[in-house]
Amino acid sequence: MNTKTWMVVPDLQVPLHDQEFVEKLIEVAARTKLDGLLFIGDLTDSTEVSRWVKGKPGEFTGNLQDAFDQTRSIVRRFRAAVGDECEMILQDSNHDERTMKYVEQYAPALASLRSLDLGSLVGLDSYSVGFVSGAYEFLPGVKSMHGHERPYTQVPGRWGMLRVIEHGTHDQLLARGGWYAAQWRYQQLEASLDAA
């Protein structure tokens, strides 16, 4: 049996990240022979270009480049930890889209600048990190998605259940709000064990 080992890195939201947690993740990545590493989205926070701070002091802090530089450094350190043979992927997400959405809305003439592309800003291109949108099958029968692709629901567990149904009969769907899907999957497994 050919097994593969992947690490799934949750939302870091640099520069709001927990540096100690990042250090531990990098240490684990270095000690583990990984076939792949998946950032499940929100690698950056991009607070300054968030709709939540538009027109408020947070929009004018001047810290956005520093945040991207910190993110680039974290991506570089993960690449160094896992080596060149390890596949690295960033899943598209709402926070990582913020800069381009801001530019498109408030400065559309700048939208074609390659230097404003997330890959350039945080080193995806430099460190051979792929970028995927939507549901992504990173292992046979295992899909990931960030979770911003569809509106949320007020009914606990419904969002995850609907994503599992939407993406077919995969054994696992890993999403940022993924405990809903995991909970649904567990309930299905529990029901089948009870029936046996």
Image (tube, helix red, strand yellow):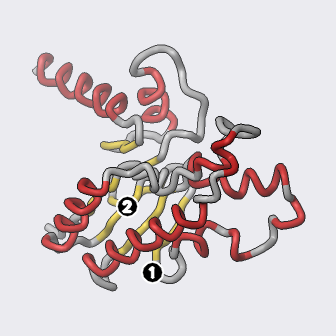
Position of residue 15 relative to residue 119, above or below, is above
Residue at the spot 23% in from the left edge and 28% down from the top edge: 186
Q: Residue furthest right?
A: 109
Horizontal arrangement in the rendering, residue 81 relative to residue 99 (left or right): left
The foreground one among 73 and 148 is 73
> Image point 47% across, 72% down: which residue?
72
- Residue in front for this viewpoint, 100 or 1: 100
Secondary structure under tag 2 reads strand
Amino acid marked by disc 2: Leu
Quarter of the view holding residue 38: bottom left
Which quadrant: the N terminus?
Answer: bottom left
- For the residues marked 1 and 2, what is the alpha-carbon distance in whole angstroms? 14 Å
The percent coordinates of residue 34 (x first, y second) are: 23, 71
Report the residue at 64% width, 49% height from top: 48
Circles 1, 2 touching at the beta carbon (< 8 Å): no
> Could you tell me which quadrant the C terminus lies in?
top left
Q: Residues within 10 Å of mark 2 (few under 14, many from 20)?
A: many
Instruction: Using residue 121 as the reference point, say whether residue 51 is left or right of it.
Output: right
Q: Residue at x 48, y 34 (%)?
A: 163
Q: Residues within 10 Å of mark 1 (few under 14, many from 20)?
A: some
The residue nearer to you, when weighing 126 against 174, is 126
Q: x, y percentage for residue 15?
A: 46, 55
Mark 1 or 2, closer to the camera: 1
- Amino acid residing under circle 1: Tyr
Q: 100 left or right of 109?
A: left
Judged from the image, the secondary structure of the residue bearing numbered disc 1 is loop
Q: Which residue is mark 2?
A: 38
Measuring from the top left, give residue 82's x and y in whole percent.
26, 77
Q: In the rendering, which numbered label is found on residue 127?
A: 1
